[in-house]
Image (tube, grey):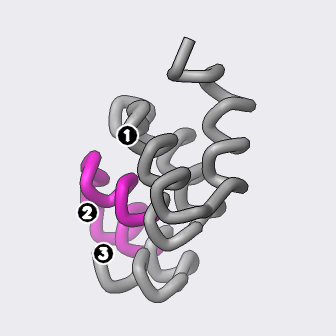
Amino acid sequence: MVNAVEHGQFEAVKWLHLQLHQPFSMDIAYRAARHDRIGVLEFIRLNAKHCITSTVFHTGCGNKHLEVAKWYEDHYGNPRK
């Protein structure tokens, strides 16, 4: 799953989760944020909310993926407040 996330293979991520029942983890969410994979983050949000933490926001910011930070704020608010 890690390779699929890092290489932007969203359909493979969905297939691995839905067909092979591979679970998500916080590490997968952080890697999605690090590689600017908004679609994967949204899929994780819908299927494993517990994996999305403020570290996703900070990882997005730290890697200059402002779309990730905006996505996080839109769904969870600003973690810096």
Q: In the figure, is residue 25 to the left or right of 38?
A: left
Q: Which residue is mark 1?
A: 55
**C-alpha distance separating marks 3 and 2:** 8 Å
Q: Which mark is residue 22?
A: 2
Please state which of the two labelled residues, at mark 3 or mark 2, is closer to the viewer. 3
- Magenta stretch in the rendered image: 15-32
Q: Which residue is mark 3?
A: 1
Q: In the figure, is residue 39 to the left or right of 10?
A: right
Q: Quadrant of residue 51?
A: top left
**C-alpha distance separating marks 1 and 3:** 19 Å
From the viewer's side, name the closer residue of 70 and 44: 70
Q: In the figure, is residue 23 to the left or right of 73?
A: left
Q: Quadrant of residue 34?
A: bottom left
Earlier sequence position, callout 3 versus callout 2 = 3
Earlier sequence position, callout 2 versus callout 1 = 2
Q: Residue at x 52, y 84 (%)?
A: 9
